[in-house]
Image (cartoon, grey):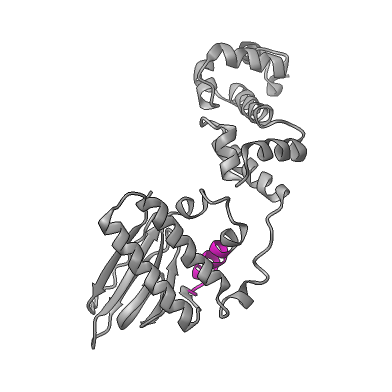
Amino acid sequence: MLPLCFHVELEYNQVKATHVHQEHEMLICLDGGGEHFVDDYKVPMTVGELFFFPAGQPHIGNGSPRQNVKMLVVNFSEVFLLADHACDEDLEQLLKYLKKKARSGYNKIPVSARTSKRVREIMIEMAKERMERLPGMPSLIRALLTEVFLLILRDPELLPKMKENIKKIGSEERIADTIRFMQDRYMESLTIEQMAKHACLSRSHFHNVFKQETGYTFIEYLNALRIKEARAMLENSNLPILEVAYSCGYTSLSYFYKLFRQMEGITPKEVRSAPSTSSQ
């Protein structure tokens, strides 16, 4: 989803009804001042300060009794930022760091005045680009958003705090994360291209690393996972065999039967007709 980039001016409001977004939110205070109410705490806002609110975190901005607050807001998805530029590992770690800090009560991003000024200029350009919608607009907005994160990453105020967090993500961790994803969503139509993208690896590299880490190809591992789940469902439920197959990601019953027998040495129907362990 393309990021939203917009200006907003808030008056003082005694009612602090928070809201949440499905996307992350970054904002910079352009003029005036006020507060942001987040969960059960509040964060003061002054001109030039930069803030980050991760997806799902309840928050609301508010002006002060003496003055309104003007902000520039960008709502963006993690996929939009990371998916199409080789999954820069440092940016990935920065985003994890900002989410962790924000959920611990530190929504303000500590950056120098120089970085704040440049981020403000870029975010203004993003809002202008979003309104004009010229050809190539999504690519330019992604490039500008990436530049904002690179400025934050390299800022002398933040970089020392990030030293311990910026570390290379090894193949083992990437594949472990991919396997957790597969275990949660094995019933969906998963492809090696999707999983390579999830792991931030090229298709060929993902294939080699997955085989090296697990001893199986991606398809072999996915089928083993699905058939294991299917057998458990056959043994512990009364669902029709066709529904079991569909529930485990198979749209062809004949293929499901063939694969099940190949891997289990028994057909799904024979599993159903076999005496249960409890009755033996």
Q: Is residue 120 left or right of residue 235?
A: left
Location of residue 201 in the rendering, given as x and y in whole percent from the top left corner: 63, 44
Q: Is residue 138 left or right of residue 233?
A: left
Whether 136 is drawn above or below 115: the answer is: above
Nearer-the-camera pick, 110 or 222: 110
Whether 117 is drawn above or below 54: the answer is: below
| Residue farthest along the bottom direction in this orientation | 66
Q: Which residue is drawn at 32% across and 78% down?
A: 30
Displayed quadrant of residue 54: bottom left
Location of residue 197 in the rendering, given as x and y in whole percent from the top left corner: 56, 42
Q: Does the magenta stretch include residue 224?
A: no
Q: Is the magenta stretch mostly helix, strand or loop?
A: helix
* Quadrant, the C terminus: top right
Q: Do we see residue 186 in this rendering?
A: yes
Nearer-the-camera pick, 238 or 18: 18
Nearer-the-camera pick, 213 or 5: 5
- What's drawn in magenta, residue-wise? 94-106
Q: Is residue 96 magenta?
A: yes
Q: Do we see residue 101 in this rendering?
A: no
